[in-house]
Image (cartoon, helix red, strand yellow):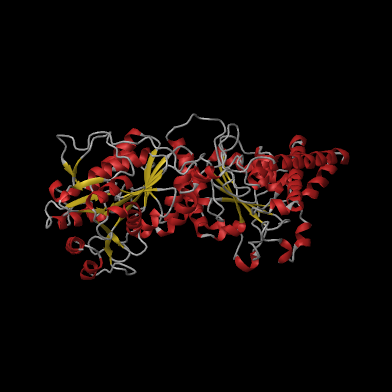
Amino acid sequence: MSEDIKNPPREKRTVSKEILLKAWELMNTANAMTVLFEKNKEVTAKYVHATSRGHEAIQLACGMQLKPQDFVYPYYRDDSILLGIGITPKELMLQLLAKKTDPFSGGRTYYSHPSLRREGMPKIPHNSSATGMQAIPSAGAALGIQYREKFELDESTDEKPIVVCSIGDAAMTEGEISEALQMAALKQLPYIFLVQDNEWDISASADEVRANDAAWYARGFKGIEVRSIDGTDFETCWNTINDVFTMVRKDRRPFLIHAKVPLLNHHTSGVRKETYRDDLDEHKKRDPLPKLESFLSKIGFESDELEEIVSRATKNVENDYQAALNDPDPKPEDLFTFDFAPTPITEEKGNRAPKDAELTLMVDCALFAVQEILEDHPEALLYGQDVGRRLGGVFREAATLAKKFGDDRVFNTPIMEAFIIGSTVGMAATGCKPIVEVQFADYIWPGLNQLFTEVSRSYYLSDGKWPASAVIRVPIGAYGSGGPYHSSSVESVLSNIRGIKVVYPSCGADLKGLLKSAYYDPNPVVVLEHKGLYWSKIPGTSKAKSKLPDREYVIPIGKGRIVLEADQNEIEAGNSLVVVTYGMGVYWAQSAAKDFPGRIEVIDLRSISPWDKELVFKAVSTHGKCLLVTEEPIGCSFARGIAGDIQDACFQFLDAPVRTIGSEDLPAIPLNSTLEEAMIPNADKVKDALNSLFDY
């Protein structure tokens, strides 16, 4: 590994005796917890955990200097940071034992995975156990703080808030770390990367898996200042943290603190040090606990006084452990709380088609929806690739918005889908409401890790403390020979991510109403927008244009719409069926239905997750036959899932199997227009499927 970057010389300052004694108490508390967990491993190791043993000095120096206005994103070895901000051993043990009274998650996630929203303490939004995944959400929180300061959305304070992302050096090799550092440097965010380097991944040592350490890596990001320190010397740690926190509060710019520390405990309770470590003796020489004891003795503290603190800390830990053991476990019914935050939009409101309104393209209905949101809500902002002033989106879906609202509210991001999606959970934690755009559905894959790991689970795993309120717009579908990387459909993947909502409107009025509903929903909502419907250029899609709904128009997410009704006489004669579809399928179905006058009902789901089971089951029970139309290949698809639910709920009413039509089961949509046409459904293919179903 390369040698440490040299820090600028700084004046040596003495830390107050009060702080030193508090650090000694908390460091011994952390040590006593590690000892107790190991002694009682038959109980404590039921659920995997790691402790801060060896990292205590840098962690306590950080935790003890955080303020209530700050945000901190600890990682799984940071129990000393939590002690430093005032969390008690019992509270930590309640999470260790996955108790119902675990104050962070109600027994839902691991030890030292805190979610905290408590008066008088720093804020800790949910962040996952995926190594390094907290970097992007924490950068999003810093971006949110910066935004709120620029627009003066909060009362001014003498000590401005900061964001600390604590992380292990091994996690710095994750690609998403680069995206967080890039945005911190680009936007000069009030953001501190606290990197604790113990020279280990799990069983892989730093010299075999890392080309350089975090301090050298950060040199590639212009505008991030670096401090590299001995993370075992409490006085050095305290003064460095104090300097950096003070500068970030004042200058509003990013820092990276690289602290070298030993790893004195197991990687986790499930990966024990004695099975693979060959450097334990060397690491023990750098133990911060005897270092602090020696320093305290040198400056005049008596050994009896220090030992009394050790004894008291050990006794408190034991008492807290016994108390935690007696707390209740969650009940089975506790599993079902906090899946989604309650939404205020529970019924359709406003005027869908004002009398004097003009027909408006679907893309412009979206534009007006976002414009109205930005006009009415100063906490709202829009960002993504190419949505800024010059272009206003590759489909012009954000045209003029940057000019109207400024480059701090509507702005371009670098090419980094993980940041675009993952930053929303941090932005939401600060009280902002981000509307972001992934340029094409084909590009969403780098962002799925954040969507699944951070965004979708924030509300549930924080026991309802941190809903991740965001609108994620995604142009989707095949249109105009877009080829294999601009034509994909991804709704089946998204519908399998629990904790998010997914909508897929097929006309301008629905897009405007659902965008508004998505904004007011406290949960993350992905809005899929078919590119082929934006301008109604494809024959048969003219009804995608709508009269522009009024400002108050909203549609409850999860409610479908009947876009074509069957004749009652045909229904009573048993000559009808229902088509259940969404997106472009709505127009294929309506075009095909012209050959079956009065015999076809078409339901536009509008929402993928949740979808309108009540409407669909009622229609299937009425008609007895059902065709599902999707643009995706049907194997393992969302549409096939609906078919299964229909078979299960409506079997006694069915006169034929539930049929599904979709694209061919191939890896990608080809560029050539002839091959594209052969690949995806169309009205003629739907008509053939209808004939087959009627003939059954």
Q: Residue at x 21, y 63 (%)?
A: 696
Evaluate whether residue 239 shows in this view: no
Residue 294 position (above or below residue 374):
below
Point out residue 533 in the picture as x, y percentages from the top left corner: 22, 53
Evaluate whether residue 602 shows in this view: yes
Of 477 and 482, which appears nearest the observer?
Answer: 477
The N terminus sits in image quarter: bottom right
Q: Is residue 303 left or right of residue 57?
A: right
Q: Is residue 342 left or right of residue 596?
A: right
Q: Residue at x 72, y 56 (%)?
A: 265
Point out residue 683 in the picture as x, y percentages from the top left corner: 18, 60
Q: Is residue 680 left or right of residue 466?
A: left
Residue 631 position (above or below residue 248):
below
Q: Quadrant of residue 115?
A: top right
Q: Residue at x 52, y 39 (%)?
A: 465
Of 456 and 177, which appears nearest the observer?
Answer: 456
